[in-house]
Image (cartoon, rainbow, N blue to C red):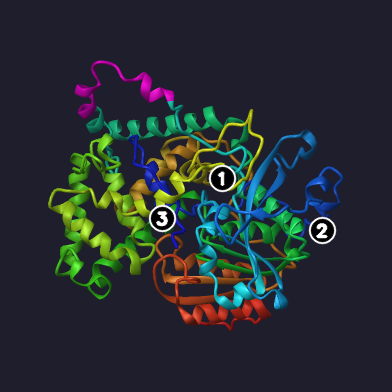
Amino acid sequence: MNRAVRRRPALTTTALALLGALSLTACTGGPAPATGKASAADPASRPDLKPFYGQRLQWTDCATDGYECARLTVPLDYARPGNGRTFVLPVARAAATGPARRIGSLVYNPGGPGAGGASSLEEGMDESFSAAVRARFDIISFDPRGVGGSIPALTCEPAEAEPEAEETEEPAEETPEDSSDAVAPLYPRTEADRSAAASGARTAAEDCEEHSGPILRHVGTEDAARDLDVLRAALGERRLTYLGWSYGTSLGTSYAEQFPRRVRAMVLDGAIDPSLDWRQRVISQSAGFRRSVDDYAEQCAEIAGDSCPGASPQEIWALIERLYQRAEREPLPVAEDSTYAEYGGMDATAVLDAVSMAMYTPEDQWEPLSEALREADQGDATKLGTLDDEEETEEETEDPGTAEGQQEEDETPEPPADNGDAALTAVNCLDVPHPRSLRPYWDALAPADQAAGVYGTAGVTAELTCRDWPSGGRRPQRVDADGVPPVLVVGTTGDPATPYEESVSLAEQFPQGMLLTYEGLGHTAYGRGDACVTAKVDAYLVKGERVRPGATC
C-alpha cells in the first residue's frame, strides 16, 4: 500500500516536487498546543464546542462495496468555534469482522501530510491490518482538514482558464525555450540559480495564498489532532485506539500531547522527531534517502535480479549520477503521451523524485525502477516518469463528490480530485518554523551536500516555499505528554523517509515509550508482511501487551 503523497511534475525552478519525497513527513504538531500538563480542562465541556462533540456519525454505504461513509463537522478555528465557519470531513469505516468480540474503533492515518484517510480505506487499506485486528476493531479513517474530500479543501493550482488564455499564435516556438529555462540544478550554486529558486518558491506560496488564503492558517497538525478527538467522541469511544504511519506519527504525537488521558493504545510507525528544527529535519530525511539509494545499489541483485541496471553497485551509482547530470543540462526525453511531455521531459528534480519515491517499498518498486533507469540511460525516460501512475490513476479519476454522498454544494467549490501536493506543502510550512531571510537556506546547502549529496541540497531548496508561508506558533520541542499510557513506536532500520534514528528518539521522549525495531528496508513496517512485527503490534493493540526493551524483528 502506497503511503506517499501523489505528486505532479516539477513546474518551476524550485524543488517543489521533491517536497513530496524528501519532505513527505517533514512536520510536527502546529501552533503551540495545550500540552499534557495543561490539558486537564475538557474541551468537550466548553459550551461553544459542545455541538461538535455531541455529534453522532450517520453511516451510509460508500461508493465502494463493503465500506460505510459519514461526515464529521469540526470548527475552522478552535479559538472561535462558534463563528459558523467549519470543515466537513469525510470519514470511512470497515466494520469489525467479529462483532461479538469487538473492542471498539481503531482510527488510523496513512501518512502525508496530504493523504486522504477515507479514500485510502475505500481503496483497501484495511487489508494492511491483520485479520485478528480487523475482527476486533472497526477500522476507521478520515480526510484531515483541507485534504482530499474535506470541504473546504486546499488548492494551490492556478485557475483552469489560465492555460487556455495563454494559447496564442506563438507558443509552439517558445515552448522549448521555456522548458529549458525551467531546468533547475539540484545544487543551486550561482546567484542566478538561487534567485530563480527563490522566485519560483515565492510564486508557489503566492498561488496557495491566492486560492486557499482563508483556510491556510487552519490546516496545521495541532488542529487536525483536535479534530481527531472530536471524531473519537462522535464514534462513541471513551478513549482512542490509534495507528499512524509516517506523518500520522506527528498527528498521533500531537494528540497524545493534547489529550494524554484519552489514549487507549497508540502505535506510531515510521516516526518523526518533533524536537528537530527545519534544517535538522531536512538533513535527517535526505540522508535517509541517500542511504536507501546506497542500499538499492548494493542489494539490487537480491531483490530485482537480472533487472538491475548495472553489474555492480558502482555501475548502478554511476548510472544514477549520469542521469541527474544529463537532466540538469536538459530534460530527459519522454514519449509524446507522457505526463512530462508538456514540460519538455523529466528535469533533474523529477528524476531525483522518481528515484527517491521508489525507495518506499523495495519489494514492489526496485524491479520497475531498475528497468526504468536502464531505459532512461538509453534515451527514453518515459517509464521512469510513470513509476507511480498506477497509484495516481484511481484517485485522480475518481468523482470528487462520490464519497461524500449527495451534499448541497450550490455555493461550495468542488474540491480538487487530488490536492495532496497543496496539503503537503501547507501543513509542512505551517507546522515547522522557517527562516524569513534567504541566507539560512544558502548556508544550509553545504552541510546538506556533505550529509546527503544532491538529496540534501534539493531538500533544502524545496523548503524555500515555506519562507513566504504563514507561520504557526510552535517551536521544535521534546514530547510533553504526561499521563499518556505506554506508546509503541515502530522504526525500520532502512527507512528512507523517516530515518530509524528518529523513531529511537521519539520512543525515548514518550513517558513509558516502547521501541520495536524492524531490521529491513523500505518505509514503515506494520502491514508489509513481517509476521514478527504483526504479532507484536497486534498483541499491543488487542491486549495491551508491552514490547520489551530492545525488541527486534
Amino acid identity at mark 2: Ala
Locate residue 50, reporting x and y percent: 83, 48
Label 2 or label 3, whichever lies nearer to me, is 2
Work out whether mark 2 precedes mark 3 in sequence or the reverse, and give the earlier one. 2
Asked whether the viewer can see residue 35, the reply is: no
Mark 3 lies on residue: 283
Which secondary structure lies at badge 3?
A: helix
Residue density around tag 1, few if under 14, some if 14–19, many if 20 or more, within 10 Å: few
Q: Residue 40 bears which disc, if any?
A: 2
Query: Residue at 78% of width from left, 47% of height from top?
Result: 52
Rendered-image quadrant of the N terminus: bottom left
Amino acid identity at mark 1: Thr
Quarter of the rendering containing residue 452: bottom left
Query: Residue at 43% of width from left, 27% of height from top?
Result: 160
Quarter of the rendering containing residue 93: bottom right
Residue density around tag 3, few if under 14, some if 14–19, many if 20 or more, within 10 Å: many
Locate residue 181, reporting x and y percent: 25, 30
Find out whether the residues at labels 2 and 3 contact each other: C-beta distance under 8 Å.
no
- Spatial CA distance of label 2 from label 3 is 37 Å
Work out whether mark 3 precedes mark 1 in sequence or the reverse, and give the earlier one. 3
Find out whether the residues at labels 3 and 1 contact each other: C-beta distance under 8 Å.
no
Label 3 or label 1, whichever lies nearer to me, is 1
Label 2 or label 1, whichever lies nearer to me, is 1
Position of 440 relative to 262 (above/below)? above
Mark 1 lies on residue: 402
Task: Confirm whether the magenta stretch covers residue 169.
Answer: yes
The answer to whether 5 appears left or right of 65 in the picture is: left
Q: Which residues are magenta?
A: 161-177
